[in-house]
Amino acid sequence: MNLLKNKSVTFVWEFMFTCSMYETDDIKAQHELLNKVSTLVEQQVIQTTMSEHLGALTVTSYQFYRWGKHHTNWTVRQETCRRHKRWW
């Protein structure tokens, strides 16, 4: 923090589920904004920060993703490990 003392710095924590958790009045505006961003991404007007598409998010696919990060020489496809023929 000492490195930042002489700077004008603001730390802001933004939680993406605040509107839905607390049922805020502007939840419709958030919905419209997210739809607009989605449209702009699909039209390639803006670029996402996504580096890898993992397919549908399921408990199994998430476990495979984490497992694959530690076992990079093993291929994981469609929720089946080719080497072990099982999901985990």
Image (cartoon, rainbow, N blue to C red):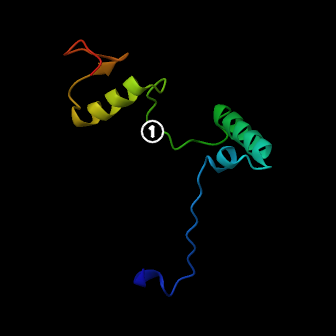
Check the image and report above or below for 58 versus 39: above
Check the image and report above or below for 56 versus 11: above
Q: Residue at x 39, y 30 (%)?
A: 62
Q: Residue at x 80, y 49 (%)?
A: 25
Residue 72 or 62: which is nearer the viewer?
A: 62
Q: How far across and how far down the image is residue 10, in percent?
A: 58, 73
Q: How far across and how far down the image is residue 4, in percent?
A: 47, 81
Residue 87 or 39: which is nearer the viewer?
A: 87
Q: Secondary structure at mark 1?
A: loop
Q: How far across and how far down the image is residue 76, in percent?
A: 30, 21
Specify whether 38 is left or right of 4. Answer: right
Quadrant position of residue 67: top left
Specify whether 5 is left or right of 76. Answer: right
Q: Residue at x 64, y 36 (%)?
A: 41
- Quarter of the image with the C terminus in it: top left
Crowd band around label 1 with a 10 angstrom C-alpha radius: few (<14), some (14–19), many (20+): few
Tag 1: residue type? Ser
Number of marks in the rendered image: 1
Q: How far across and how far down the image is residue 32, in percent?
A: 77, 40
Quadrant position of residue 1: bottom left
Q: Residue at x 49, y 23 (%)?
A: 56
| Label 1 sits on residue | 51
Outermost residue toward the top? 85
Outermost residue toward the front? 22
